[in-house]
Image: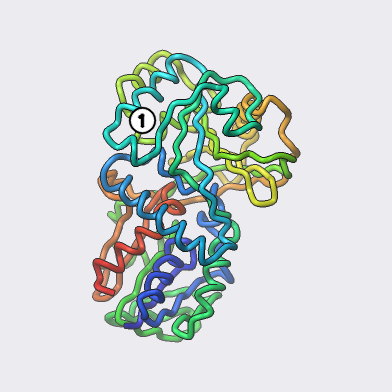
């Protein structure tokens, strides 16, 4: 079988990976010299802890298993099973964590409620003020800025894989065939369009105006090296408000009686924080849904994140080295992890994993391969 993959972000690259692994010939086409979108502008978290029960959690757990196996083969991914701590400060927040422990899938997630002392024993960099922490053993991380590059280096070792950067696919010219902006036609048995947040142009033409996917903008930042290990990923209790796993009467009470700060509420914020291989901290994030998106980044969210992180670390943050904004595609049908649609004969659109792209991409691609009989 010959598979044409359009898009070199993590979703597209994982489709290429599974196809090559199954013995197929793959041509991967990318309109930039390399992927520049949400696949790089994220935390690199393999984030199991907050996923909705059922298909979403099953997908994340399978992806976590696949990431670990791929990481053993490709050490440059920087895979580490670091787990996460969601820090809580008051009784209302702790009640939400306790409610999460009553879930039927608690063992699969590796949840445990720790005292502050137990959390500091696990992550000594957390010297600041908090009451307790929800530990999720199954969370992990990779290096987002380099993961696709390392995966591609491994793929290029196969004579069945071809990478064509700097080409934008403009037209479907038949079953399993596309034409790029160089005028070249690429023919295969199947085409996978993994175009990320690029939902206009050819995608709109093929999928129509009612594609159930929206674009979401975020802001993030990264510090210079912390100077000590941050041994786990870290979240704050605002993440309870964002992730579906924490829905409960306790969360309803938290929302009713303990509002977010005005800045956090205005920008739909949560704290997520991961240490990079160079020792810096990736910190975020915000969520913007209304179009048109702002073209600039705002300082108030960064100030809020800095204040929260410093209060948990009990020390000033290192200098901020980078700030950025990103846009990802999110399926608005919450019953699905991703939007997967045959838009023309032999041409499949796979888009809209939302904030789950880095987490779930290996399992999303595996399911595509299974369903299409690769």
Residue in view at x 58 percent, y 47 percent: 325
Measured as percent of width and height from the top left, residue 273 is found at 57, 39
Residue in view at x 54 percent, y 55 percent: 79
Residue in view at x 29 percent, y 31 percent: 103
Measured as percent of width and height from the top left, residue 261 is found at 53, 21
Q: Quadrant of residue 40?
A: bottom right
Is residue 303 shown to the viewer in this render?
A: no
Residue in view at x 39 percent, y 77 percent: 4
Position above or below: 113 against 181: above
Q: Is residue 293 left or right of residue 60?
A: right
Q: Secondary structure at mark 1?
A: helix
Position above or below: 370 against 273: below
Quadrant of the drawing holding the N terminus: bottom left
Q: Nearer the viewer, residue 360 or 212?
A: 360
Q: Is residue 224 left or right of residue 67?
A: right
Q: Nearer the viewer, residue 345 or 26?
A: 26
Position above or below: 80 against 203: above
Residue marked by disc 1: 246
């Amino acid at each position: 079988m010959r598979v044409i993959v359009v898009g070199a972000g993590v979703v597209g690259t994982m489709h290429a990976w599974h196809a090559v692994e199954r013995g197929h010939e793959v041509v991967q086409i990318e309109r930039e010299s390399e992927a520049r979108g949400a696949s790089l502008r994220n935390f690199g978290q393999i984030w199991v802890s907050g996923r909705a029960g059922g298909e979403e959690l099953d997908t994340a757990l399978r992806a976590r298993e696949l990431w670990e196996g791929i990481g053993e083969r490709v050490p440059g991914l920087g895979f580490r099973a670091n787990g996460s701590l969601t820090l809580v400060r008051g009784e209302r927040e702790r009640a939400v964590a306790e409610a999460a422990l009553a879930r039927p899938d608690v063992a699969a997630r590796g949840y445990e409620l720790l005292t502050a002392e137990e959390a500091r024993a696990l992550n000594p960099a957390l010297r600041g003020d908090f009451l307790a922490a929800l530990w999720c053993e199954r969370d992990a991380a990779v290096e987002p800025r380099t993961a696709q590059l390392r995966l591609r280096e491994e793929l290029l070792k196969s004579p069945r894989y071809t990478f064509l950067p700097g080409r934008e696919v403009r037209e479907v010219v038949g079953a399993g065939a596309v034409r790029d902006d160089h005028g070249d036609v690429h023919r295969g048995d199947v085409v996978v369009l993994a175009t990320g947040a690029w939902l206009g142009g050819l995608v709109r033409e093929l999928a129509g105006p009612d594609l159930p996917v929206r674009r979401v903008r975020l802001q993030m930042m990264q510090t210079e090296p912390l100077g000590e290990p941050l041994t786990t990923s870290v979240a704050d209790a605002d993440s309870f408000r964002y992730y579906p796993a924490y829905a409960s009467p306790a969360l309803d009470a938290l929302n009713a009686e303990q509002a977010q700060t005005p800045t956090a509420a205005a920008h739909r914020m949560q704290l997520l924080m991961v240490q990079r291989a160079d020792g810096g901290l990736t910190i975020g994030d915000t969520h913007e849904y209304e179009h048109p998106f702002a073209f600039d980044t705002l300082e108030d969210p960064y100030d809020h994140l800095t204040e929260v992180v410093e209060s948990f670390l009990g020390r000033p943050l290192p200098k901020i080295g980078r700030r950025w904004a990103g846009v990802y595609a999110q399926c608005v049908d919450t019953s699905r992890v991703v939007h997967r649609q045959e838009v023309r004969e032999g041409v499949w659109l796979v888009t809209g994993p939302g904030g789950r792209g880095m987490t779930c991409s290996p399992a999303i691609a595996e399911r595509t391969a299974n369903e299409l009989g690769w």
